[in-house]
Image: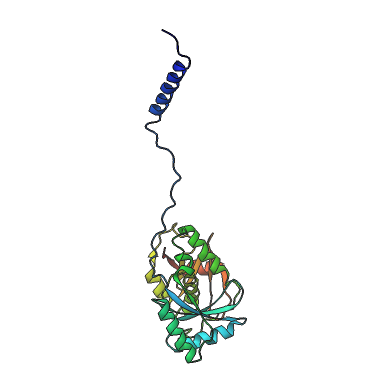
């Protein structure tokens, strides 16, 4: 019988291929690990908000905020990346509701031009693209923008803890989450943290008036540092949890993520 060149090498190649496949049968191909899903926040997400103003001086933003608060509207002012002070108003279920509310304020001559901030404009609302760690980084980046600002919140400054809680509320609000107004309410709304669980962006609470009642709050930056408004009208600054004053008055921490 005549020999057919190439047949044996082809058969050997096929056998080798079958052996390789058999040897790898129990090994699944490696796949990149999917990023951990971001936990659902314990706070309501902001919907549609009215934004107005671009003030060079904080006093103008404070006066507008006070007039809006007098109208029984939720309002706060903040400094943005450009260094201008702006004001945000309300939390409306739809764009149409926000535009209608802005129209009413224009007719009362409380505001002029306005911009509607939509859910997708917040870091929280970007289609879940941010991991929890990235979202915490956004919170810290926002908070650090206020360092050195002689902040005044206006309106409800007589409410216990409102100046300091106004800062934390604004930081969370600018990132799409609605914190309650006062430090005591913020304490109640969060999940308690055990020692060692504290992470950047969580809130730290103090009893600065003695006893065990919450009267002060700051936002944790990491490495025992926290950012806060020490007292009404003071400049926003960073202090340490290891500072004797704050260590003796520290009550605990809360997370909302």
Query: Residue 77: horizontal and vertical position, in percent?
Result: 52, 79
User: Where's the N terminus, which quadrant?
Assistant: top left
Query: Residue 60: horizontal and vertical position, in percent?
Result: 58, 85
Question: Is residue 142 or residue 236 the one in the foreground?
Answer: 142
Query: Residue 26: horizontal and vertical position, in percent?
Result: 37, 32
Rendered view: 44 above or below 105: above
Question: In terms of image quadrants, where is residue 11?
Answer: top left
Q: Residue at x 42, y 23 (%)?
A: 14
User: Where's the C terminus, which quadrant?
Assistant: bottom left
Q: Residue at x 43, y 49 (%)?
A: 34
Q: Is residue 138 visible?
A: yes
Q: Residue at x 46, y 77 (%)?
A: 49
Residue at the front extreme? 2
Residue at the bottom extreme? 108
Rendered view: 58 above or below 242: below
Rendered view: 209 above or below 191: below
Q: Is residue 241 visible?
A: no
Rendered view: 3 above or below 132: above
Question: Is residue 165 or residue 56 the one in the foreground?
Answer: 56
Query: Residue 106: horizontal and vertical position, in percent?
Result: 49, 88
Question: Is residue 118 or residue 153 the one in the foreground?
Answer: 118
């Amino acid at each position: 019988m005549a020999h057919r060149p190439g047949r044996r090498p082809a058969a050997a190649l096929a056998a080798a291929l079958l052996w390789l496949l058999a040897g790898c049968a129990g090994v699944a191909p490696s796949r990149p690990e999917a990023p951990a899903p971001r936990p659902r926040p314990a706070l309501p997400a902001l919907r549609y908000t009215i934004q107005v103003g671009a003030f060079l001086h904080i006093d103008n933003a404070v006066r507008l905020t006070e007039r809006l608060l007098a109208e029984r509207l939720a309002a706060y002012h903040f400094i943005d990346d450009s260094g201008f002070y702006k004001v945000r108003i309300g939390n409306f279920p739809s764009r149409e509701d926000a535009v209608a509310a802005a129209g009413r304020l224009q007719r009362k001559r409380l505001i002029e031009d306005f911009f509607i901030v939509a859910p997708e404009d917040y870091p929280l609302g970007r289609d879940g693209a941010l991991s929890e760690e990235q979202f915490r980084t956004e919170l810290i980046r926002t908070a650090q923008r206020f360092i050195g600002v002689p902040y005044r919140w206006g309106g409800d400054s007589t409410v216990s803890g409102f100046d300091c809680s106004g800062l934390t509320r604004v930081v969370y609000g600018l990132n799409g989450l609605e914190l309650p107004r006062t430090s005591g309410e913020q304490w109640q709304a969060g999940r308690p943290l055990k020692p060692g669980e504290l992470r950047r962006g969580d809130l730290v609470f103090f009893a600065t008036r003695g006893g065990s009642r919450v009267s002060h709050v700051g936002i944790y930056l990491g490495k025992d540092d926290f950012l806060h408004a020490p007292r009404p009208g003071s400049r926003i600054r960073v202090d340490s949890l290891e500072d004797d004053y704050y260590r003796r008055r520290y009550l605990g921490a809360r997370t909302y993520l």
